[in-house]
Image (cartoon, rainbow, N blue to C red):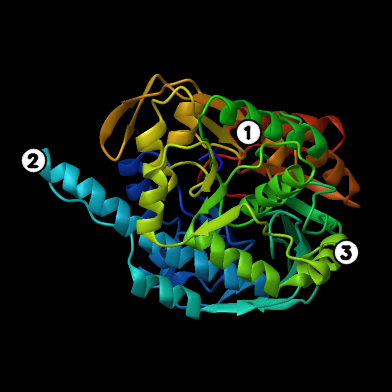
Amino acid sequence: MRTVTGSLHVVEANGSRIFLDCGLFQGRRADAFEWNQRFPVPPADVDAVVLSHAHLDHCGNLPTLVAQGFRGPIFCTPATRDLAGLVLRDAVKVQRQDIDIVNRIRRRQGLPRVRPLYRGPEAEHAIRLMRTVRYGEAFQAGRVRATFYDAGHILGSAMVLVEAGGRRLGFTGDLGRQGTEIIRDPQVLPAVDLLITESTYGSRDHDTHAEAIANLASIVTRTTARGGRVLIPAFAIGRTQEIVHALMGELEGQRIPDGPVFVDSPMAVDATAIFRRHPECFDDETRARLRRRDPFGFKNLRYVRALEDSKALVARDDPCVVIATSGMAEGGRILLHLQRFIGDPRATLLFVGYQAEHTLGRRILDGAEEVRIFGETHKVGLQVERADAFSAHADRRELLAWALSVPKIGRAFCVHGDLAPAQALAGALSAHGIPASVPMVGQTETV
């Protein structure tokens, strides 16, 4: 797809067929629905899935795979299993809520009903198939050997080393940044014959974390001063905890107004509890802090679980900060806030992560004057800002430095990025002696 969504790669070796990830493609509703129902091979013929991490674009289509006949194991780290269960159950709820709203509008418009991609039983079946493996422990996926390495992206995220017939394939999943708070830095893979690497920010360098936090503080201060609210679409896993941690530091340092902060996401409440259960994924500083105090909470912060409380929050008109899912504004409670405030010039919409093509977030970020939310057209009147440095993805410099630290890479495929960033990373790798290219959808390669 040459885009940052819907991660899935097929590996065939030693008579086995495995999937690396099985992510949900997100974009235009009709296109996404059709795309997510198609797999490159029949699901019943897949021996195993090796899951890099729990973000929706990497695990979110597992229930569809199960519904179409997959019965093999799904290998992942312990933290990924806990988080993926949360993500899939939330995806079921979000689909049901969004479909109910859309169908009410379609009924008024005389249009036929639409149905969700999958429901609860398929999600629960996928969760039951998950088998946990710790970092560094080799396991058999079908008749190939695989090992997880810490990717430093989110809690439990992993790179995958696949070995068969004397050949090695490396898969980054999503590669994290160096020196971030909360989780450890990415590990280095051993030598590989082929590397499949993400390229989300293959053409862009991030600001430093200090610059990102200063920018966040400035946006919050300016917006609340004019009586508006800051809306932050964020993944409930990883990004929300990082933003909460940054706001806590800025409030304690009195660098932002002493106003209310809301995390409007039941999933984020549960995700934060899972974070606390997996200190083995934290860096030394966060582990030490966890023994002294809660690194994910402060007096001004309120986690909102009940839908009625969320609706009451939407109805308020006082200055505040609201962090809500989903990260690309394609579903979830952020849409309720946007429906109310997208035309309010006092408000600010702050993007703290990548916005894939054809998502609502990307259309707003690209300057659309009008957008559709729940089937209705709204004028965009709020302020739009971005802070890519909060991204959990490595930037151009970090991707290149990490690849050059691997002892040997025979060649590389740059995936999970829009075409321009993917091509930029491929060019940079090639210039440093690693032959690299951007594969097409459906392309096959022999290692």
The residue beneath circle 2 is: 110
Mark 1 neighbour density, 10 Å: few (under 14) some (14–19) many (20 or more):
many
- Whichever of labels 3 and 1 marks the residue nearer the N terminus, that label is 1
User: Is residue 166 rendered to the left or right of residue 383?
Assistant: right
Q: Quadrant of residue 209?
A: top right
Mark 1 or 2: in front is: 1
Note whether 353 is above or below 445 in the view shown: above
User: Is residue 378 rendered to the left or right of residue 262?
Assistant: left
Report, in whole angstroms, how far the alpha carbon at label 1 lies from the one at label 2: 43 Å
**Which amino acid is tagged 1?**
Val
Note whether 176 is above or below 135 in the view shown: above
Mark 3 or 1: in front is: 1
- Whichever of labels 2 and 3 marks the residue nearer the N terminus, that label is 2
Q: Position of residue 431 (x, y in %)?
A: 84, 29
Mark 2 neighbour density, 10 Å: few (under 14) some (14–19) many (20 or more):
few
Note whether 160 is above or below 432 in the view shown: below
Q: Position of residue 393 (x, y in %)?
A: 70, 44
Quadrant assignment for the C terminus: bottom right
Q: Quadrant of residue 433?
A: top right
Which is more toward the observer, 213 or 91?
Answer: 213
User: Is residue 285 rendered to the left or right of residue 437?
Assistant: right
Contact, CB < 8 Å: mark 2 with mark 3? Answer: no
Q: Which mark is residue 284?
A: 3
Which is more toward the observer, 245 or 257?
Answer: 257
Report, in whole angstroms, how far the alpha carbon at label 3 lies from the one at label 1: 30 Å
Q: Position of residue 406 (x, y in %)?
A: 87, 51
Mark 3 neighbour density, 10 Å: few (under 14) some (14–19) many (20 or more):
some
Please tell me which residue is depicted at 42% across the width and 21% down the height of the picture.
381
Please tell me which residue is depicted at 41% across the width and 30% down the height of the picture.
342
Disc 3, SS? helix
Q: Which mark is residue 220?
A: 1
